[in-house]
Amino acid sequence: MISKWIILIIIALLIYWGIKNLQRASKQTRKSNNEIEDMVCCAHCGLHIPRNESIVAGKKYFCSIDHQKLHFKSTQ
């Protein structure tokens, strides 16, 4: 009876160890797959944001639609 419990505990520990190793490996893979993104400066407030998160109007980049509108209102 005790040997069955010991075997179940060992199996549970092996499953736990395997899951932890998979999680650690996936974190390392994600870190290595991340590429460095170009940063751009908001033409209105100067905030630096990743290019893929910015709003582009002409050759200018903005951190939000509100800043894009404010910038063009102030230049008119």
Image (cartoon, rainbow, N blue to C red):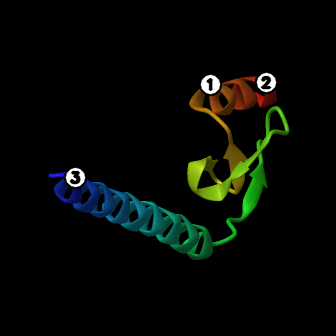
Kindly identify the residue that appears in the image at 81 percent across and 39 percent down: 47
Q: Residue at x 22, y 59 (%)?
A: 3
Q: Name the element at disc 1.
A: helix
Residue at mark 2 to residue at mark 3: CA–CA distance: 79 Å
The residue to which callout 2 is attached is: 74
How many residues crowd around disc 3 within 10 Å: few (fewer than 14), some, or many (20 or more)? few
Q: Label 3, label 1: how many angstroms apart (C-alpha)?
A: 68 Å
Q: Nearer the viewer, residue 32 or 15?
A: 15
Label 1 Cα neighbours within 10 Å, binned few <14 / some 14-19 / many ≥20: few
The three-letter code of the residue at mark 2 reads: Ser
Q: Are marks 2 and 1 in contact (CB under 8 Å)?
A: no
The image quarter in which residue 74 lies: top right
Q: Which residue bears the numbered disc 1?
A: 66
Pick whichever, 56 or 19, lies toward us: 19
CB atoms of marks 2 and 3 within 8 Å: no
Task: Give yes or no for contact between labels 3 and 1 (Cβ–Cβ under 8 Å).
Answer: no
10 or 39, which is in the foreground?
A: 10
Q: Position of residue 25 (x, y in %)?
A: 50, 72
Please indicate whether residue 73 sits to the left or right of residue 26 in the image: right
Residue at 37%, 57% in the rendered image: 16
Q: Compared with residue 18, is residue 54 higher up or lower down, i.e. above or below?
A: above
Q: Quadrant of the C terminus?
A: top right
Q: Nearer the viewer, mark 3 or mark 1?
A: 3
Give whichever of discs 2 and 1 has the lower sequence position.
1
The mark found on residue 2 in the picture is 3
Q: Which mark is residue 38?
A: none
**Side (left or right) of 6 relative to 54:** left
* Amino acid identity at mark 3: Ile
Disc 2: CA contacts within 10 A as few (<14), some (14-19) or many (>=20): few
- Helix, strand or loop under label 3: helix
